[in-house]
Image (tube, helix red, strand yellow):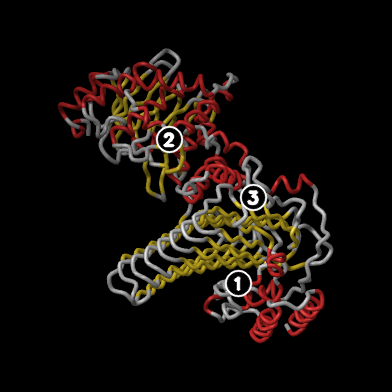
Amino acid sequence: MLDIKDLYTSVEDKKILEGLTLSVKAGEVHALMGPNGSGKSTLANILAGKDGYQVTQGSVLYEDKNLLELSPEERARKGVFLAFQYPVEIPGVNNIYLLKAGLNAIRKHKGEPELDAMEFMDLVKEKMKLVQMNEDLLSRSVNEGFSGGEKKRNEVFQMTILEPKLAILDETDSGLDIDALKIVADGVNSLRNKDRAFIVVTHYQRLLNYIKPDYVHVLGKGKIIKSGGPELAIELEEKGYDWIN
Amino acid sequence: MEDIIKNYSADFTQLQNIEKNNWFTKQRQLAFNIFQESGFPNTKNEDWKYTDVKPISRNIFSNITESNVAINDDELDATLFKNLECINLVFINGAYSEKYSNIKNISDKTVIKNMANALVNDESSLKKHMTQYASADSGPFEALNIAFIQDGAYINIPANTNIEKPINITYISKGNSNKFATHPRNLILLGENSNATVIENYVSNGETNYFTNSVTETVLLQGSSLIHYKIQQESSNAFHIANLNTSQSKDSRFESHSISVGGALVRNNINASLNEEGAEIIMNGLYMTENAQHIDNHTRVDHLKPHTHSHQNYRGVLNGKSRGVFNGKVVVHPQAQKIEAYQNNANLLLSDDSEIDTKPELEIYADDVKCTHGATVGQLDDNMLFYLRSRAVDEQTAKNLLTYAFANEVINNISFKPIKNKLEHLIISRLPNSSLLREYV
């Protein structure tokens, strides 16, 4: 599904990724760990299509096509989803309208019929329960006045509605208490299937108790310095990142 | 310049020959003399520093209203509020259209009529107010207006009267072989504890070059309340200078919503005088410019007595090579203690070549007051744009969505739904490729 080969990127001449290679197949969950500044969020942003990063070398293929030449909205329509580390507040833009139009843009791209307001609301009610979203948050502006935890839950809620093929969760666990963490994990687990892949960027092993990864990778200085199974995360928790260096 | 003034002079003589001598003739003459002496303002004048009126002063316009300009029903329908029952006064190229107006069946004591009629028949009640608030000394355009008034709306609402239907004054300017100027004049009087909603709507059916020079005077007696909408959607080649002067008594409330999207060169002046305790004015404004448009909003509020309130919120969206100006002055007079004045001007620049000059001013001569003012200029937020696009919104729609949200802050303050909806559509129609936007709003 996703094939990142020898990727080098920089922001304003500062090198961030330096030869990152990662292959993700449908049905897999990859955890991406590593200390601050190792390039985890950069990778998540590059995959979603954020401006401001120069790719100086390497390639990213998504479903065998060059992902990097697609606009963010084209990526979203083709099934790439980023759950943001810091979801932005957008005053005056309604949460639910945004989500409905987004879903219908994706369905249209897939050649599926668009949902009408009734069908959409049925879907919303079903998924809201899953992530225990408060109904009056939905009618508000995007993330406006949401607590940190509510913002993160809204990201997962959006993900369950949009049903992406490749979901990238950028430190969705940070700032969450244990109950919220479980809810977020439930949302992710409900979506796990053989056609869908996840890249879970996290700082801590804690989240991986609830979302069992197939692979764990450790990022250091812009590339993957160690890969393994779930046991690697536990080892990291015990010994710290210095152990790898 | 001399030639231009000569042209106005010739038109003025012609108007004097058409009109029979009446009580107003002398005032016209005095006003014209003042205009002749001053000429048009230039940018050395502090009030006109950012707005150069040469495009107006170098053009020759015909100032005599042609009363036989025809319009078809479709053209009219597009301008009126279809789903809203209004008391309509319609003016076509400055001339009152009895055919399209519906001011019959108004109760006995309430007067709603066209100004040409009132000038002849309502001398005694007009005399007391007409030109008292926007006089020939207020400025060259005000003087020019007085000299050339041909029509407009005269509204006089007695005490304790609630006019439920909005009074909708529509000024339609329609393409013509010669360039023309109209000088609409409105006078709105609200008796004690009366309520009314008035819409001034300036529209055009084409890309015609003309000049609108309007003046509206409003007087709010004790406890009265006026909601005033001014919707400026003139042709992209039109010049539009408008003055709104208000005089407010005790506990009166004036709510102004000024939406300006049309015109090549536009200046909106609002002069508010809070004369007695408890008087309150709310001024909401939105201007949206593109291409080479220039829209200038000048406001002035005089807090003359204690416990008066003013609340201004103006927003601008500027695109292309357009230019906006906001100059808001709040003057707190020495005896006006315990007043509250709030003023904010926020601007969104959508292009590198657009420009805004914003100048909030406070002059405070009292020591126990609560005044805040501020101005901001910004661009669309990259993080917001990226967030929307990552949720499958295309780039143009994402930009439109954020622009709409910004502009809608002003429209959201309108409590009357049919007008709010109409204005929301107006804003959407001004955004590029905005058809997809409707799914999001």
Q: Is residue B44 above or below residue B434?
A: below
Q: Seen from this angle, which residue lies furthest bottom?
A: B37
Query: Looking at the image, can residue B415 be seen?
Result: yes
Q: Is residue A183 left or right of residue B123?
A: left
The residue tagged 2 is A7
Local crowd size for mark 3, using a 10 Å CA cut-off: few (<14), some (14–19), many (≥20) = many
Q: Are marks 2 and 1 in contact (CB under 8 Å)?
A: no
Q: Quadrant of residue B362?
A: bottom left
| Residue type pointed to by label 2 | Leu
User: Is residue B310 or residue B46 the one in the foreground?
Assistant: B310
- Which residue position is annotated with label 1? B130
Q: Percent position (x, y) of residue B262?
A: 64, 57
What's the chain of the residue with tag 2?
A
Mark 1 belongs to which amino acid? Met
Q: Are marks 1 and 3 in contact (CB under 8 Å)?
A: no
Q: Residue furthest top?
A: A194
Nearer to the camera, A20 or B53 = B53
The answer to whether tags 2 and 1 share a subunit is no
Kindly indicate whether the residues beneath marks 2 and 3 are on one polypeptide chain.
Answer: no
Residue behind mark 3: B87
Q: x, y percentage for residue B265?
A: 64, 65
For residue B122, what is the image quadrant? bottom right
Query: Which amino acid is tagged 3?
Result: Ile
